[in-house]
Image (cartoon, helix red, strand yellow):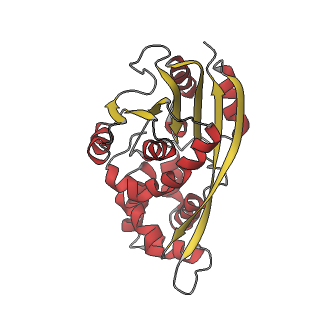
Amino acid sequence: MMYSNPAAYERFMGRWSARLAPLFIRFACVEDGHRILDVGCGTGSLARALLAWGNTIDVLGVDPVADYVLYEQQANQNSRTQFQLGAEDAISYSDGAFDGALGLLLLQDIADPKRVVREMARVTRRGGLVAACQWDFQDGLPMMSLFWQAAEAVAPEAVACHRGHGAPKRVNDKDLGELWISCGLWKVRTTSLELTMEFSSFDDFWLPFLGGATPTSAFAATLNRETGGTVAEVLRDKMPTLRRDGSFALPARAWAVAGIASH
């Protein structure tokens, strides 16, 4: 699953990632002074949070999408960061090159998560940290479930066709823990990470959907256009009760897992 237009992605999901990243880092117990590999760095939410977490943390981000790497190279020129083009399942660094390897919202889009986790463990020194998190797509991301409810109400056949081409993997904390153990990691622990996002208006919530930065948002934009804006109208009716000023909040939950490299 490929992504495009990093600026549009930042407006759509980047604000969620920015809220999630500090919670993930706290759970993972990243220490200052460590050299961290940010696997699938995307628009750099985790890298920015890591720099804020410690004064001497160094971050190297890798991502397989050239536009995202270029975006981060231009947006984040801190001397403690580097961003490079690279595949998550074939990391071009030697064994034990990092104190830790982290993946924020990475595995949900990976065809072979075990291969990626093994690579993350390989490039992490013995005793180092390997951690990841991903959204709870089952019932922990109302932002998406509300959209899909509206889309199904308007165009059920189009939704069924789109989902037939693949959907994010639905896993829970137990699944992630078992994956980490199967990859030979020690002292595996899991948790749920909870957050709330404030929206100033329905447009603040909805317009970033129309940027087409991900397969879901591209589908949303196309379906809304083809239905003459009906998807947006139905979705507006499904939103939680708005405050007097039109603002509202939505919760979200992600599953997180961490373990220690044993090689």
Q: Residue at the spot x=32%, y=43% of the render?
A: 72
Total labels: the figure holds 0
Q: Is residue 252 visible?
A: yes
Question: Horizontally, is 161 left or right of 139 in the view?
Answer: left
Residue positioned most to the bottom: 244
Residue 70 pos. (x, y %): 27, 40
Q: Residue at the spot x=52%, y=68% of the render?
A: 154
Question: Horizontally, is 59 left or right of 154 in the view?
Answer: left
Q: Residue at the spot x=50%, y=63% of the render?
A: 155
Residue 178 pos. (x, y %): 71, 28
Seen in the picture, residue 71 relative to 96 is either above or below; the reply is below
Looking at the rendered image, the quarter that the C terminus falls into is top right
Give residue 88's quadrant in the image. top left
Question: Horizontally, is 86 left or right of 262 in the view?
Answer: left
> Considering depth in this image, is 158 or 77 the residue closer to the camera?
77
> Considering depth in this image, is 80 or 88 the residue closer to the camera?
80
